[in-house]
Image (spheres, helix red, strand yellow):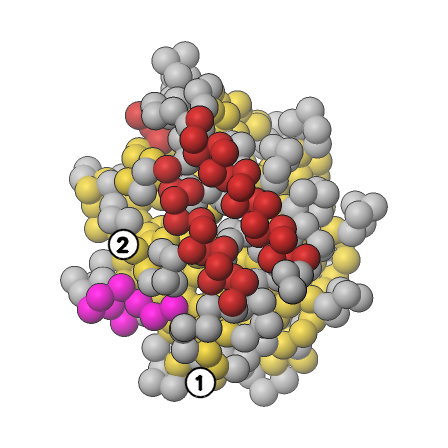
Amino acid sequence: MIGFKQTTAVALLAASFAVSNTAQAGLLYNIIDLGTLFGGPDSYGLDINASGQVSGQASNPSGVAHAFVTNQTGQMIDLGAQFGRNDSIGMSINASGQVVGFSPNSINAHAFFTNTGGQVIDLGTLGGSQSIGYGINDSGQATGWSSTSNGGYRAFVTGPGGQMIEMGTLGGANSFGYGINASGQVTGAAMTASGSLHAFVTNLSGQMIDLGTLPGGHDSLGWRVNVFGQVTGQASTATDSRHAFVTNPSGQLIDLGTLGGHDSVGSGINAYGQVVGYSDTKNGSREAFVTDNGTMVNLNTLLVSSATGWVLKEARGINDLGQITGYGMNNGLNHAYVLTPVTTVPVPEAIWLFSSAILGITGLSRRKIRK
C-alpha cells in the first residue's frame, strides 16, 4: 500500500513534470534590496520560504547584528538578541515564517527557533555548553548541532515537543546537521571511522547514509536537502579545491565546478533541483551562482538591465518559484536581496526527480547505512 509520504511524492512528481514541460530557457531576474535594520550598514539574506519571506542577519546603526525575518510586505522584523547575548542570526525559515538560528557570544552559542506566534524559544543543548540551529522544515522540525556532556558534537533533530534528539555519526566521533526537508530527512556532515568528514542524508526512517566524496577528495558536507532527498553542499576534489555538488538519482555527488576560480559552495536547492551558492571567479572575487540545466551560471549576468550598482556575492536560498536570496554589494555596502524571475523558471533538472523520489520512498536502500 502506498502511504501518505509516497502519495505526496508522486503528486509532486506529476506537478514537477507538468512545469518542466512548459519551462523556457533564458533566466532573467528582477532584484529587490531588503535594506537593513533601523538604518544599519549591512544585511545578509540566508534563506527564503515559499512565500518569499526571508530570514537572515542585519546590523543596526550601532553595529550590533540581529536575526531578522521579513513580513508579507518585505519589511525586516528584528528578532532581537537572545539569552543574554548581543547578536543573533536567522539561518533558515519555513513556510509558516518560523525561523531557526542561534545567538552567539564570545564563549558559546544557543540555538533558537520561533514558534507560530513569533516567540523566540531556546532549544537548549545536548548536555554541553553550546548549540547552533541551521535548518527548519514546514512542520517546525529543526536541525543543527550541539556540544554534548562528553565534549563532542552531535547533530540533532527536534521532536514533537521541540526537544533535541541526538543523532548518530558515520562511525566517528562527531556529526553536524545543516538542512532538513518536509519529510524530516536531514543532511549535514559526520565523522567516519577513519576520521574523515562526509556529507550524509537520512532516509525516511532516520538512518544516516554516507554520501561519500567527489572522486579523489577526502571530505564533504551537505548544506541543504530538497523534498525529494537531493542534497547540495561542498566537497573536496583530487586537486584539493572545494566544489559545490548536487546529488544524482543514485545519491552520488555531481561536481558543479566553479565560476573559473578555486572553490565553490552549493548553499540552497529547490524541489526542481536548481542549486544556488557562491564561487570564486577567475579574478579571485566571490560571486553568486544559480544552476541552469545543471550548469553553474553567474547571477550577476542574469540581472535585468535596470539593476545597476549591484555585485551579487552570495546566493543562499532558493524557493520553488525560483526566487533567490543572499547578499551583494550595493553601492559599497553589503545588503540582503530577493531575486524574482521575470521569465518562466527553467527546470530541466526535474528529469532527476523521478528517481530521486523513488530513492526517498525506498529509503535509499542501495546506499550504505550507519547509525
| Residue sitting farthest toward the front | 1
Q: Which residue is mark 2?
A: 255
Query: What's under tag 1, amino acid-wise?
Result: Gly
Work out whether 281 lies above or below 239. Answer: above
Q: Which residue is mark 1?
A: 171
Task: Please state which of residues 97 and 34 is positioned toward the viewer in this rendering.
Answer: 97
Q: Secondary structure at mark 1?
A: strand
Residue 175: in sight, yes or no? Answer: no
Q: Earlier in the sequence, mark 1 or mark 2?
A: 1
Measured as percent of width and height from the top left, residue 121 is found at 77, 58
User: Which residues, given as a range, are shown in magenta?
Assistant: 210-218
Q: Is the magenta region chiefly helix, strand or loop?
A: loop
Q: Residue at x 67, y 74 (%)?
A: 165
Q: Residue at x 80, y 47 (%)?
A: 116
As measured in the structure, the alpha-carbon distance from the residue carrying label 1 to the one carrying label 2 is 25 Å
Q: Which quadrant of the view contains residue 49? A: top right
Asked if disc 1 and disc 2 are in contact, CB closer than 8 Å, the reply is no
Measured as percent of width and height from the top left, residue 191 is found at 42, 78
